Image: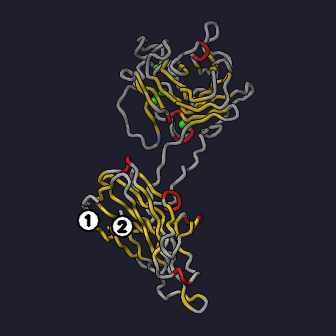
Amino acid sequence: MKLRLFQLFIICTMYTGNVIKTHGVPVHQESSGLLVIEAENFATQHLDNARRWIIFSKNTPHHNYPDADRAHYLDASNGRYIEILPDTRSNHHETLIINENFSNNAGAMAVLSYPAYFQTPGKYYVWARAFSTGSEDNGVHIGINGQWPTSSQRLQFCQGKHKWTWSSAQRVSGNHCGTPNTIVIDIPHKGVHNLMVSMREDGFELDKLLLTQDASYQPTGQDKPETFSLRKPLQEKKQLFEISDYTRILYATEAFTIERTGEVPYYRHKAENALAINAVNTHYRNKFAYADYTVEAKEAGMQTLTLVTLAEIDGESTYTVSINGQEIGRFTNPKTLEDYQEIYFHLHQVNLNKGDRIRVASKAVTNGKIPENNGTAFARGRWRALVLSKE
Ligand SMILES: [Ca+2]
Ligand SMILES: [Ca+2]
Ligand SMILES: [Ca+2]
Ligand SMILES: [Ca+2]
């Protein structure tokens, strides 16, 4: 047998239940032919060096950009909306500068992205809620997936000045105010699609977007709340809580062979995923049971071994770990008030070779504290796993 370098650390750790909770930003999702998005909840903004969408709420500080109207967050859905500034053309007396304060080229300026999951492909009517105070702040472009279909350019607001107003009308030559339900996009297939908004006129104020497949739908007031995907919590681990880095988990009940060489056999305690000793049989008390594992080639090398045992209220079992008959670690469970709490015993710098026999042994013992029948209850020497991790 080759000489093994190892250090023994008898310090053990217990799982204390501090798990980091992950949390993410909610994701927009269409369901039953309806998608509702607060305009201020855009994901990204591009091409925004000349004009930029700015989020307004009661907490927005004063700004010094050219702007013809005050903030309008009072009746805004979610108390927030966006306005594209500076606004250097608020009425037709002010100079029209193409690609600066006006762009008939959809997708050219201040492009917002709203990725959303669509369950229902097909035709959608696009409604927007805007606040217009003049004749030069009431048009915007809608796009989808980097495309700017002719059917969704030039969303126009003629009616309802000086208040938040819904429109789905497309400005067309011959009818600058357009007619409802003429801003339309097509969702080609189920999946994530990027709804987009770009500038037509500066000073435009956008509160909310609503996409519906219902041609008779007429939004009113702040209308429906945003539609999000319902995010279920991810499955958290239920065992081996403190194992945060490993190369291989050798589960006691799966990887190890129960050895009948001793007088005491292990049994598989399925509910706790552990090997255990049936201490009801008085012959099985205070004696070691054994389980073996043969090291595979890919596990060879310097490893840290962590023996994961289960603390028990009725006794503090002793455990040993041996390699090819040489004991390299002996541990005793700590006292506990909680049954089956995981305990971790670490053996550092263990050099494993292919074909080595790793043996884990444990004893059923009593601490005399828990009365049972005419005596006291026994801990069953339970252990769950031997975990390998690289040094
Ligand atoms: Ca303004
Ligand atoms: Ca303007
Ligand atoms: Ca404005
Ligand atoms: Ca809003």
* Badge 2 element: loop
Three-letter amino acid code at the position of disc 2: Gly
Residue closest to the eye, 45 or 14: 14
The CA span between labels 1 and 2 is 18 Å
Count all numbered tags in the image, as a single digit.
Answer: 2
Residue found at x 72% / y 29%:
217
In the image, 380: left or right of 8?
right
Q: Mark 2 highlights which residue?
A: 325
Which label is found at residue 37?
none
Residue closest to the eye, 47 or 139: 47
Looking at the rendering, which quadrant does residue 126 occupy?
Answer: top right
Residue lying furthest bottom: 374
Q: Is mark 2 within 8 Å of ligand 4?
A: no
Q: In the displayed structure, would residue 151 be above or below residue 56?
A: above
Residue found at x 56% / y 32%:
116
The percent position of residue 361, horizontal first and vertical second, equals 43, 70
* Badge 1 element: strand
Q: Residues within 10 Å of mark 2 (few under 14, many from 20)?
A: few
